[in-house]
Image (cartoon, rainbow, N blue to C red):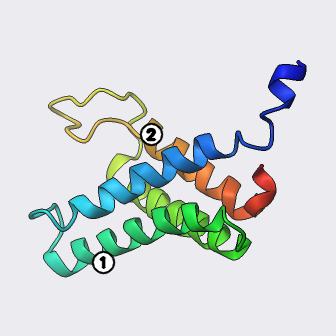
Amino acid sequence: MEFLNRYANLVHWLPRAALAGIFISHGISKFMGPGMFPSPIWQLQGVAELSAGVLMIAGAFGMEILTRVGGLIIAVIMLGAIVMVHWPRWFFMATEANPMGGMELQLLTATIGIYFLVKGNDAN
């Protein structure tokens, strides 16, 4: 256990970096071509996703409000995705009837966003 305790203050980087990577890459992708929504909404979504990812990383370096705002943006985006696209499909596989697949990734990213919103930098 002593070995694991040595790294306890760094483990917050695992969900933080994964979440930021997902949102930064998805945000950038919105500017690479047409999407499922009209262009202005698609680009606003891209700005929100990119901003959320950057805020999650920047917040780790001291300004807790950045972490909390990033978590809020992520939670809102993912809850919107669940309600508008993925509800009530739980199964992850895309099918002919459900080409967007299930909502387990969206639910997971929403809950991690809520975690960082509530805990801020105390997540580490």
Q: Tag 2, which secondary structure?
A: helix
Q: Earlier in the sequence, mark 2 or mark 1?
A: 1
Q: Label 2 amino acid? A: Leu
In terms of depth relative to the viewer, which is nearer, 35 or 28?
28
As drawn, the label of residue 44 is: 1
- Relative to 30, is 101 above or below? above
Tell me the quarter of the picture where residue 55 sits: bottom right
- Relative to 54, is 7 above or below? above
Q: Tag 1, which secondary structure?
A: helix
Identify the residue at image location x=50%, y=49%. 19
Q: CA distance from mark 2 to mark 1?
A: 21 Å
Judging by the rendered image, the residue that carries numbered circle 2 is 105
- Relative to 74, is 107 above or below? above
Q: Image check: 81 left or right of 44?
A: right
Q: Mark 2 touching mark 1, by CB under 8 A?
A: no
Residue 123 pos. (x, y %)? 76, 52
